[in-house]
Image (cartoon, rainbow, N blue to C red):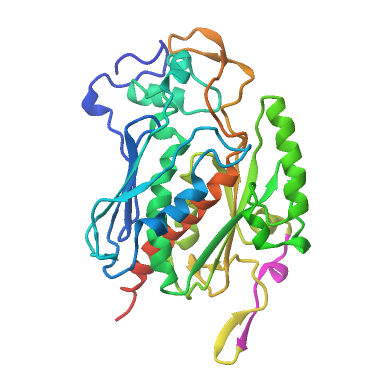
């Protein structure tokens, strides 16, 4: 063991060949690898295993990236990025060829000097300390690979997965159901209204949340939120019954989004206080179709889709980059005070809605292709 960022039990290996960064790929058959850093020349993704013949173009992928890009409202970072995607391979005459699809998004609005004052300081709520301890160095400019900007590559790849799933009649929609203690009224649910700046399908709740966020901005603070995702048109049997359960794979995919701290399916944690007679979804016949009277399971039984809508919720923590003074330590073990500069969202969830959709699409696309080998 060699030197750590400061003396103590947090030592790291000195030999560079021991400090390997893995884990940038997701999926088995439909495999996505993201690359790039927040303040590097660019970022993007490589999609391997996408079937040939799917109609796709940059305009379609861009429509998803435009939902994630910064600078679109007073509740997002003022960093101005077009997030313009370029398809570098794997598409010919408007259709996928079955070969790896490479997607590139250039960074054009980096202001790395905003981070020079924290290059040796560990920001509260960030990955700085773990990154420095694990690898012996870190890209302090916006968080490097730990930056939320990494998700742009996921969204670009997810758009391709979305197009694949649409061919099977599968649709994915996510939206914000709660910001702070302000939750939507389910009786006023309007998916068209979710096009507002906060992606809340309830106009009144969105207006209240807007005022709440304005107050937090004036107080140099941030807010957490809940994102709900609904998958419709799911065929029965998607997902494998042991380690590759649909809910297990979705949980891993959604929890891999940097700010997500929890996920629940169907009734979620409310099952703790329910009875089996209340929680079980009874089956009935609708013509020649097997259906459920209720959907407490969230569309998943035994790790496989049961034909009902797949429903889950993900809890997003407050943006850790706040402008208040905070106490922390530097990489030499000295206790210091930090005041973060730069351009940061006061809330993560509205821009993350499309990231949730993307990771859901990638997961289901992969399991859908795996399902094709389930029987002769």
Q: Is residue 122 left or right of residue 366?
A: right
Horizontal and vertical percent position of residue 47: 30, 54
Q: Quadrant of the C terminus?
A: bottom left
Horizontal and vertical percent position of residue 38: 40, 32
Picture mark count: 0
The one nearer the camera, 116 or 177, is 116
| Residue at 41% in and 49% down | 154
| Residue at 65% in and 62% down | 191
Queried whether the magenta region covers residue 64, the answer comes back as no
Q: Is residue 34 visible?
A: no
> Which image quadrant for residue 276?
bottom right
The one nearer the camera, 310 or 196, is 196
The one nearer the camera, 98 or 307, is 98
| Residue bounds of the magenta highlight | 274-285
Question: Against 208, is 53 above or below?
Answer: below
> Which image quadrant for residue 94?
bottom left
Q: Is residue 183 left or right of residue 248?
A: right
| Residue at 50% in and 46% down | 68
Residue ranking furthest to the bottom: 287
Horizontal and vertical percent position of residue 269: 66, 53
> Which image quadrant for residue 73?
top right
Q: Is residue 228 left or right of residue 104?
A: right
Question: Against 126, is 300 above or below?
Answer: below
């Amino acid at each position: 063991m060699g030197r750590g960022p400061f003396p103590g039990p947090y030592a790291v290996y000195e030999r560079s060949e021991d400090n390997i960064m893995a884990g940038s790929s997701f999926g088995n058959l439909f495999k996505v690898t993201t690359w790039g850093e927040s303040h590097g020349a660019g970022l993007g993704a490589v999609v391997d295993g996408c079937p040939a013949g799917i109609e796709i173009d940059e305009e379609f992928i861009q429509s998803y990236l435009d939902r994630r890009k910064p600078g679109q409202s007073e509740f997002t970072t003022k960093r101005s990025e077009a997030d313009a995607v370029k398809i570098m391979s794997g598409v010919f005459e408007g259709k996928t060829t079955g070969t790896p699809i490479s997607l590139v998004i250039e960074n054009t609005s980096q202001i790395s000097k905003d981070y020079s004052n924290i290059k040796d300081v560990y920001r509260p709520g960030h990955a700085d300390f773990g990154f420095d301890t694990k690898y012996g160095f870190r890209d302090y400019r916006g968080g490097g690979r730990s930056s939320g900007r990494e998700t742009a590559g996921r969204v670009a790849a997810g758009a391709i997965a979305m197009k694949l799933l649409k061919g099977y009649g599968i649709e994915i929609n996510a939206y914000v159901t709660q910001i702070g203690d302000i939750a939507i009224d389910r009786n006023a649910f309007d998916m068209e209204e979710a096009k507002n700046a906060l992606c809340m399908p309830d106009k009144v709740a969105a207006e209240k949340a807007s005022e709440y966020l304005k107050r937090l901005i004036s107080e140099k603070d941030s807010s957490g939120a809940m994102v709900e995702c609904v998958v419709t048109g799911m065929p029965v049997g998607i997902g494998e019954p042991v380690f590759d359960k649909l809910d297990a794979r979705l949980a891993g995919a959604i929890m891999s989004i940097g700010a997500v701290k929890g996920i629940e399916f169907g009734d979620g944690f409310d099952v703790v206080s329910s009875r089996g007679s209340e929680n079980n979804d009874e089956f009935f016949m609708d013509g020649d179709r097997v259906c459920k009277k209720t959907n407490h399971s969230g569309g998943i039984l035994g790790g496989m889709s049961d034909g009902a809508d797949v429903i889950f919720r993900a809890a997003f923590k407050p943006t850790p980059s706040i402008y208040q003074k905070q106490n922390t330590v530097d990489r030499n073990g000295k206790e210091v005070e930090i005041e973060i500069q730069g351009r940061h969202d006061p809330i993560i969830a509205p821009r993350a809605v499309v990231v949730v959709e993307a990771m859901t699409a990638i997961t289901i696309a992969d399991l859908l292709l795996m399902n094709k080998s389930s029987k002769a």
